[in-house]
Image (cartoon, rainbow, N blue to C red):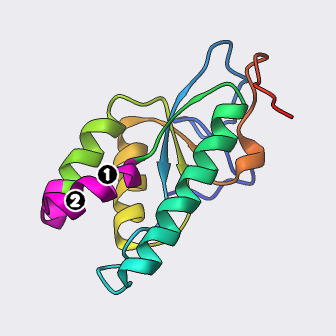
Amino acid sequence: MASHSNAAYGPTGIGYVKPTKPLHIFISSPYSDGDTLSAAERIVNVKRSFDLAEQVARLGHYPFVPLAAHHWNEQHPHDYAFWLRWCKAWLSRCDAILYCGDTVGTVEELQYATGLGLTVFKRMEDIPGVGNERTWN
C-alpha cells in the first residue's frame, strides 16, 4: 500500500471529500490476536470497538461492529475462516473502514477493503462529520 501523509484517503490516494450523506463504516479493530488473548482480554477489545462505534455514530455515520458477533461465537463457535468470510461480506457493503490496529485479522480486512476501493480511515479525527452529528449531554 502506498504511503500517504493524510491518514484518510480514497481509492485514488488523493484525499477525502466531506460526505454529504452518512457513510457505512466498518470498525476494524483487534479481537483475539491470533487466538492468543484470554476471554477477558477479548471482552476488553469488544468494548473498545463499541466505544469507537459510538464516536463514529456521533459524527452522523452508521458504524458496523464485527466484534459484536463475539457473543454469537461464544454460543455457536465458528472457525477463523468463517468469520473472515463474514467480515468480508459486510465490508463489501460498507463505504469505508476505520482501521484500528495491526493484527492478522485487521490487516486482512484492510487489504480487502483497499481492494474494494473503500475509503480508509486510520484515526478517528480524520472521519468527517456529515452535518447531522448527534450530540448528547
Q: What kind of residue is marked 2?
A: Asn
Magenta residues? 66-82
Q: Quadrant of the C terminus?
A: top right
Q: Position of residue 68 (x, y in %)?
A: 39, 50
Q: In the picture shown, does residue 65 fall above or below 119?
A: below
Front-lying residue, 17 or 31: 31
Compared to residue 57, the image places residue 81 above or below, namely below
* Residue 21, magenta (yes or no): no
The reply to whether the magenta stretch includes residue 77 is yes
Q: Are marks 2 and 1 in contact (CB under 8 Å)?
A: yes
Location of residue 41 in the rendering, given as x and y in whole percent from the top left corner: 46, 79
Q: Most prominent secondary structure in the magenta stretch?
A: helix
Q: CA distance from mark 2 to mark 1?
A: 6 Å
Q: Position of residue 19 (x, y in %)?
A: 67, 19
Residue at 62% from the left image edge and 50% from the top image edge: 52
**Viewer-side residue, 93 vs 83:** 83
Callout 1 amino acid? Ala
Residue 99 in the image: above or below residue 97: below
The circle on residue 73 is 2
Residue drawn at x 29%, y 47% as measured from the top left: 87
